[in-house]
Image: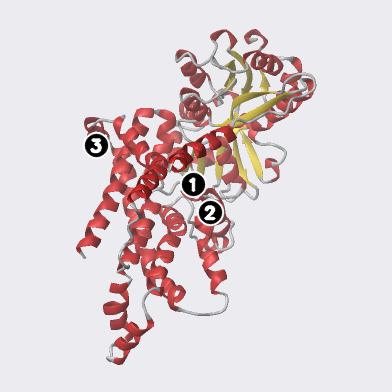
Amino acid sequence: MAGKKTIPPRHSWWLLILLALPLLALLVIPPFALLARTSPSTLLRYLGTPAVVQAIMLSLWTSAVSLLIVVAFGTPLAYILGRGAFVGKGILEAMIDWPIVLPPAVAGIALLMTLGRRGLIGAWLAGAGVQIPFTPIAVIIAQTFVAAPYYVKAASVGFSAISRDVLDSAALDGASPLRRFRNVTLPLAFRSVMVGGALTWSRALGEFGATIIFAGNYPGRTQTMPLAVYIGFEIDMHQALTLAAILLLISFGLLIGIRAAYSRG
Amino acid sequence: MRWRTSFPIALVLLISGGCRKEQPAAVNAPPATVNVLAAASLTESFTEIGKRFEAENPGVKIEFNFAGSQALRAQLENGAPADVFASANAKEMNTAWSEFLVKPGTIHDFARNRLVVIVPKGNPGKIATLNDLGNRGVKIDVADASVPAGEYTLQMLERMSKDPEYGAEFKRDFLNNVVSQEENVKSVVSKIRLGEADAGVVYVTDVTADAAKDVQTLSVPDAVNPIASYPIAVVAKAPQALLAEKFEDFVLSDEGQEILHDFNFIPASPGMR
């Protein structure tokens, strides 16, 4: 897709490697250090305990629902941002970015102010007998809020990179808008969409700060893997290490799986 | 060519050099910082104690790290640079002691605390007595069992279940109503102040003048109220051991005890000092 990669002269490579090494080491060593402290047998033993299973299942299904919501509503939004030209687009883009920039704890408080029992919308919902905090729905909302920008940003970049001519000729061929999107736009932006989806899923899976503030911490209901790791760290270091290793393996597996699916597709 | 390879090294040296913080030299005594790890429930009282201590000891700066006692103990285990550890229960202090993290001779109880039930202003859960906490549909927020306040809450429930006043089912009914187990007791206060839950169990000292604007309290009778004891100690590897002892002495002094009393703590029993 991109042009031929330019190869720097040999001595520059060594310099680049030398400069990249410290950061690479920082990113790669800690996960291995974590895994080095746990053994496969303890991992399996903890995988059998109800508390761990509960946290894993909750994390998996809530983050999957979050991803579905983000893809369903984020794709049109990404298309508007990627291909549309309108006044205030820059401001809109900046506003969509704010969950990335702000600390998750701030996101949690903002969500409480919005959907809490006395929040902007929450007070009205409470009047109708609906309470969101302390439920799995709150977990999903926190994850969606924090993770959505990654997908929207990546997908909109993908949509914006498609040349006008390609879409015009597809329209001239008489393809309906929906068919054009499915057969031309989406395949051309596929890479960006997949990368965005993977980022969003991983971010949702790792969400902590907004969840503990907005959704609270209750095993089986709102205690996701990251919360279980955090609480576990203070009670039983060993359990926390094991949970952390499991979370690491799951998210790593997800990323690898998505990459494999992408390279085949 | 040579400068190219030496550049990253120079960069590293530059960065590490930048990390060394040069303290501005004071006229008389060199400034010293005492790091105090203190239970979240001590936030207000210790902040005040720190201010007074600093005023009486020019050149000394007290830095606080307030969190759940179990989190602080975990930080100590992981080598956090600290001088003083003040826990909200004996359990975390005993663990720290058994792991040689604190100086045994310096462990003293310095305050006691008790539990109270708080409800948001307006009492949305219509809780008139402690018995109502077992009513269906009431939303209760508590501290996690790993946090001292959460452990005391469970002790309270245990005692209440044995008391005919509340009945044997009380603990079960209460726990069924729990919607969240917070990681520190101050989060319980915040969520009740925001009205997110109908009731929360916290320490008497958490109902500060500021918090009292947003919550109402229901007292827990002595018979079922576990009295929390707060131990303090100098950290074994304290970089500022002498000042740490001085700070501990100040907490145990009449002046320190008076400040704690102002923040609704029960002073330590004199025998313990």
* Mark 1 to mark 3 CA distance (whole Å): 27 Å
User: Is disc 2 surrounded by few (<14), some (14 to 19) or many (20+) residues within 10 Å?
Assistant: many
> What's the residue type where badge 3 is placed?
Gly
Q: Nearer the viewer, residue B193 or A99?
A: A99
Residue with the mark numbered 2: A107
Q: Can residue A219 be seen by looking at this rendering?
A: no
Mark carried by residue A48: 3
- Element carrying mark 3: loop
Report if the CB atoms under discs 2 and 3 are less than 8 Å apart: no
- Eye-nearest disc, 2 or 3: 2
| For marks 2 and 1 on the same chain, the one whose residue lies earlier in the sequence | 2
| For marks 2 and 3 on the same chain, the one whose residue lies earlier in the sequence | 3
Q: Nearer the viewer, residue B182 or B34?
A: B34
> What's the residue type where badge 1 is placed?
Gly
- Element carrying mark 1: helix
Residue B49, image x and y in percent? 72, 25
User: Is disc 3 surrounded by few (<14), some (14 to 19) or many (20+) residues within 10 Å?
Assistant: few
Say above or below: B140 vs B79: below
* Mark 2 to mark 1 CA distance (whole Å): 8 Å
User: Is disc 1 surrounded by few (<14), some (14 to 19) or many (20+) residues within 10 Å?
Assistant: many
Label 1 marks a residue whose chain is A
Say above or below: B134 vs B150: below
